[in-house]
Image (cartoon, coloured by chain):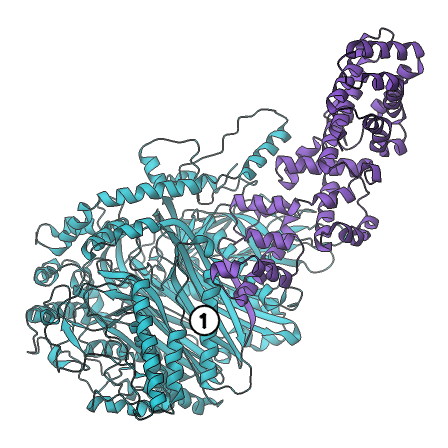
Chain colours: A purple, B cyan
Amino acid sequence: MTNELDIFVGNTTLIDEDVYRLWLDGYSVSDAVGLRVRSGILEQTGATAGVLQSDTMDHYRTFHMLERLLHTPPKLLHQLVFQIPPSRQALLIERYYAFDEAFVREVLGKKLSKGTKKDLDDISTKTGVTLKSCRRQFDNFKRVFKVVEEMRGSLAGNIQQHFLLSDRLARDYAAVVFFANNRFETGKKKLQYLTFGDLAFCAELMIQNWTPGAVDSQVDDMDVDLDKEFLQDLKELKVLVADKDLLDLHKSLVCTALRGKLSVFPEMEANFKNLSRGLVNIASKLTHTKDVRDLFVDLVEKFIEPCRSDRWPLNDVRLFLNQYSASVHSLDGFRHQALWDRYMVTLRSCLLRMYHD
Amino acid sequence: MPGKLKVKIVAGRHLPVMDRASDLTDAFVEVKFGNMTFKTDVYHKSLNPQWNSEWFKFEVDDEDLQDEPLQITVLDHDTYSANDAIGKVYIDIDPLLYSEAATVISGWFPIYDTIHGIRGEINVVVKVDLFNDLNRFRQSSCGVKFFCTTSIPKCYRAVIIHGFVEELVVNEDPEYQWIDRIRTPRASNEARQRLISLMSGELQRKIGLKVLEMRGNAVVGYLQCFDLEGESGLVVRAIGTACTLDKLSSTAAFLPACNSPSKEMKEIPFNEDPNPNTHSSGPSTPLKNQTYSFSPSKSYSRQSSSSDTDLSLTPKTGMGSGSAGKEGGPFKALLRQQTQSALEQREFPFFTLTAFPPGFLVHVGGVVSARSVKLLDRIHNPDEPETRDAWWAEIRQEIKSHAKALGCHAVVGYSESTSICEEVCILSASGTAAVLNPRFLQDGTVEGCLEQRQEENLPAGCGFCHIPYDELNMPFPAHLTYCYSCRKQKVPDVLFTTIDLPTDATVIGKGCLIQARLCRLKKKAQAEANATAISNLLPFMEYEVHTQLMNKLKLKGMNALFGLRIQITVGENMLMGLASATGVYLTALPTPGGIQIAGKTPNDGSYEQHISHMQKKINDTIAKNKELYEINPPEIPEEIIGSPIPEPRQRSRLLRSQSESSDEVIELDLSHGKKDAFVLEIDDTDAMEDVHSLLTDVPPPSGFYSCNTEIMPGINNWTSEIQMFTSVRVSRLSNINLTNQTLNKNFNDLCENLLKSLYFKLRSMIPCCLCHVNFTVSLPEDELIQVTVTAVAITFDKHQAVQTTKTHVEKSLQRASTDNEELLQFPLELCTDSLGPHPFSPAKEHLESASSNSGIPAAQRATSIDYSSFADRCNSWIELIKLKAQTIRRGSIKTTVSVEKASPLTEGHFRQRSAPACANSTVGVVKMTPLSFIPGAKITKYLGIINMFFIRETTSLREEGGVSGFLHAFIAEVFAMVRAHVAALGGNAVVSYIMKQCVFMENPNKNQAQCLINVSGDAVIFVRESELEIMSTQQPIASCQPACGGGEIAT
């Protein structure tokens, strides 16, 4: 005797968090049943495998029906078919839009196109995330990107409003969108040590300070693109390394202030000009799209790696960067203080966050 | 022209894309009522159109208002070709027709298409202006209230309970009309939906007229069903109990005393002493009214005379026939006379109620039921549905005569059902024979209650168990003892009833769901041969179902069944029987004896061993069950009880396993003569199987209880979490080697597995109880069995349960006090009513017992506040996000967000809140429950009956996720539409919800499936008790959010 039809419909839609996770993780019904059996649920509840199979099928069917609504979360709130308590709705949405660290590091900064989608097979094998789950995460990125791409207002705010995500997750998505839009290179081997958290941190600062939205909250694309004018202006900073007097003065100011305070003072003194040149050159080249994409590679190559090879402690890096940015204010011949601050405040925080093993 | 219907179409949302090119839709709306149609403008290129139409006004008769549904069709405008229909909304405007119910229907309705399901929503406002109509000969019955609830609704009190009302209307089924060959499935489905909607309206109106004629103002326990008779037509029938209700809150607004009897005299069409021989009734061919009868083995079917078509018995119409019992005798006769005078004026003294005002139910005789097999033929003249009427009249007569045989004048907990397969139809009716207190049946007969003193002075809660029949002239030999509570009156050893456990009954331990399941193969046959075969099988099925129930009851160590419902389903090649009931241990009844197995051939050693092994297992199970259900009755020395009457028969009631196979029913006669002969044939493997199957029923996992009555006997501390659900399973039987045994096993497994699945799914609610578990079985095809279950899981507080089990008296008092919310109305009314004439009336005593215990509920309520306020606090951050989002949009950085709160008590707020203005609203929670109440809450208003019928069809079954995906989505949609209608009425819950029909047909080869669903219930507004208290203390607490405000709209 076989069950041709087997359904359970509650007035309040039953959501089993464990099964939801298995479904999100892309397991088939039979795999999910297997995993549930292994979790010891049969012993706990005294249920049979048949019951578990039926229960899992039922939940999967429900999730499948909900998926269409989850693509536009406000619809989930307004729809009438599934009566779900608000806290559960929030959970459904939040989990559906959550992503795996391993996966996001593979996709971050890549164009969210069909081409990338084709590579999901490889990403799946590489990260151990099921292909189904990879697809969901990728489609989520793409969907969010499409919706907020050309929208006015705060990026994270827009995402939160249209996808009803938690504050944290919305900011993460803002980072994903920002990276995808600017196509920052994050996949290079020397960047592998950076976590998504590091990059999202940087993205948030850049969105706050380096986009058109930072100066004017009424422009289009205010949060997704870098401020073109700002990038153009950054060329002016070149004088800091091009003018030898200025460079020497800058160095002496920093050295005076830090003498006796750094454990790596000699190394710093020796490397000052290289480091300064590196940081300023990065700024002045940002008018080229290619160099924008390589921003993180450059930061690692030009600053982090040299410091790391000299075994600077993090605290020394902090002291140096603080002094390095502050001393510029004492350079009488330098007129772009505001510009410098806009650049350096963000960069300093990014570098500090990125400075780890 | 006494009514003006006004409709306004406000907006739509989430419409489907109808124009592929633009990915948009040019939507407009047609509003139709009767023959009149209005249209809105086309709202171009939008999936969220804002029509904001004018008020469309229909000036119509109130007759039409009752019959016709308002039909709203959403279409996509197409310049060049025909406009495409997006979907429809049918709105039953009946709730707007009585003054106390809803005044406006306003809200978002799902737009439903029979092929595509729900496609977006539409916001509609409907109002009715009724003009007073003084026409005496009117055809309408506006103003009569309808309730599905099978007890007196919570915020009313019964002034008079008039009695049975019934009506049926027939029509041709559009699906079988010639035109169906040329029209689309959609058109055909819509024609059917519309027709049934129309017929329901007409039926309700006609019933309403009958009620007005009886001078009533309401129908309680209204049950409407439709029979899809296929070629021969479509029957919509309804039964209910006419009452005169008085709203409790309205202070002393007494209705003018209605002296109904004079009016009712007209209603007596039949002879006073109806001939119980329904056998010979009717001019139709004998085959077509096979009211089978057989004389049942007296010893099993004692209380349940369902198979007891014992027509040889003279119905005891003569009162006080000299056969008076000891003390109660003369009184009984007197009471009977009064009751009878009240009841005899009625054609059918039936009541569809299952719970009653205290004091209403005097004695309960037992279950009465009747079935008859009919051959369907085309209904030639829909306006004269005489044959169907005659069929039912016949069955009702039989029920009435059964009740008389049990010395009862009324039948309570009455219901009717059908099962149809091809052209054969089984009509069934069942109820509980009872003796009622005449006080509620007629107005102004209160003096009759004086005599009751004697009877009802007895310790509370055993009166209804006392036998209503004369012990010297019993309808069947029953085993009687003196009541274990009062020791004065006689009680039977087991009691079967179709009603809920009376609130004043005292029980020991907890109850449990008991099911008897049975299949019988039958040869495929045509027409009359088929009908004969079925008629021949029916008695055996009934008999076996009863034996199974009795055995299972004993196995649980219990002595009474409540809410018994036996369903016999007919299929092409088999009959299925499913009986569900809730077993309890009534303190008033004797302790059930164990089950003993006897073998026929004692000389076979190994067999003997086997038997004794089985016996041991059975005894162990009984002991285990007693522990599980906390059944520990106090030991009572036998001598106090007195000797059994009428003959000192062997007390132990043996398992009649030996006679469970159908071929042995011939042996039934044995039981007349030599009572103690227990014959077990060695080669009777069936019997063995049956014993085994008895033992295979596993109890629910710990923390779970189940029952099919309103509330679980023995649990009285419900907390507020409820989950109503419907579960459907269709199983295919392997075609080969179908025998009765394998069938039985399959069916048993199907039901058991289904229950296990439910327990597993709802495990997060433990400790909880599945209440009102309602199984329905159908046989859609040869090898398919469909089982549909609807029930509600309710959580309860385990710790309090432990405290309360001390003595029965204490417990019963507590129960009374827990229920006082519901009972309040009656004690109140009894108090004013009965104080004068008889100060020592039992009713008053009852009141006192309830009020003296009012300390207890206070404590209980205190905990329930905590619980629900905890739930209420679940104010998710999603709303916060939305608020934030809005502030962001507004550009203002800091707006203090005050979540809109409204006191759910005041209606004005409800109206406001459900107003269409709130376009950006989250959906309010609407609770659904098959029970008549909501735990931890008080129903403040009944908004009207919900009675909806839907058809869903698909030609892309695979694409919709197969049969499971299709039906899952459909049932979810049906729930959604019910909730939307309730919310639009301003309600926040449906009580007494029932899925009356779920007909599923599939054709996987053609990738097609079709399903019909009929649901009903009462739309209500409820308020949490915790909120009530907050309201009363006048302390608006900021974090208090209405948990389930009706049509609730936040932000």
Q: Position of residue B228 (x, y in %)?
A: 47, 74
Image quarter (top left, top right, bottom left or bottom right) of the N terminus of chain B: bottom left
**Residue B307 versus residue A175: which sits nearer the camera?**
A175
B787 with respect to A22 (left or right)? left
Q: Residue at x 80, y 19 (%)?
A: A264
Q: Looking at the image, is B914 positioned above or below residue B891?
A: below
The amino acid beneath tag 1 is Cys
Q: Position of residue B129 (x, y in %)?
A: 41, 48
Marked residue chain, label 1: B
**Residue B729 versus residue A33: which sits nearer the camera?**
A33
Q: Residue at x 73, y 37 (%)?
A: A195
A283 with respect to B901 (left or right)? right
**Residue B782 versus residue A200: which sits nearer the camera?**
A200
Residue at which label 1 appears: B751
**Residue B613 versus residue A83: which sits nearer the camera?**
B613
Q: Position of residue B186 (x, y in %)?
A: 61, 66
Q: Secondary structure at mark 1?
A: helix
Q: Looking at the image, is A15 positioned above or below residue B324?
A: above
